[in-house]
Image (cartoon, rainbow, N blue to C red):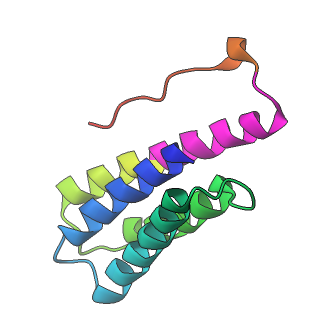
């Protein structure tokens, strides 16, 4: 879950620092991040599926990537976050099947 929280945090920071992104999208990302942060801080570990959070974030990222008004540098950050989301989703899928240490690979750092 901490990986999903990290990705949500990064996306929230990029979205909030980009004036070209609509207030509606900013609010959606902020709400997802705040809700997930509250769940993690509460200590609840059952019933919270990181895939659900990552899928919601992936939907927002897809919308952002389609926005022609975003500056290239912000779009590059959003694309890097998209890659992190995809890697986290893949890692979560593997983790749900059981951990095989021989299959673990590091996630590439963001630029």
Determine whether 28 is above or below 33 in the image. Answer: below
Please identify the dominant SS of the magenta region. helix
The percent position of residue 95, horizontal first and vertical second, equals: 73, 35
Q: Residue at x 63, y 54 (%)?
A: 50
Q: Magenta span has 98?
A: yes
Quarter of the rendering containing residue 98? top right
Q: Residue at x 49, y 72 (%)?
A: 35
Residue placed farthest to the front in the image? 42
Residue placed farthest to the right in the image? 97
The percent position of residue 81, horizontal first and vertical second, equals: 40, 50
Determine whether 77 is above or below 27 in the image. Answer: above
Q: Residue at x 28, y 50 (%)?
A: 76
The percent position of residue 19, horizontal first and vertical second, equals: 16, 76
Determine whether 10 is above or below 63 in the image. Answer: above
Say whether residue 14 is visible.
Answer: yes
Q: Nearer the viewer, residue 45 or 99?
A: 45
Q: Nearer the viewer, residue 97 or 46?
A: 46
Q: Residue at x 67, y 53 (%)?
A: 45
- The magenta segment is 83-99
Say whether residue 63 is visible.
Answer: no
């Amino acid at each position: 879950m901490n990986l999903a929280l990290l990705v949500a945090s990064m996306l929230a920071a990029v979205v909030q620092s980009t004036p070209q992104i609509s207030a509606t999208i900013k609010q959606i990302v902020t709400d997802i991040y705040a809700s997930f942060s509250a769940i993690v801080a509460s200590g609840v570990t059952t019933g919270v599926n990181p895939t659900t959070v990552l899928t919601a974030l992936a939907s927002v990222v897809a919308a952002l990537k389609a926005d022609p008004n975003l500056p290239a540098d912000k779009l590059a950050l959003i694309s890097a976050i998209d890659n992190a989301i995809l890697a986290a989703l893949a890692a979560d899928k593997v983790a749900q099947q059981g951990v095989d240490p021989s299959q673990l690979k590091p996630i590439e750092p963001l630029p």
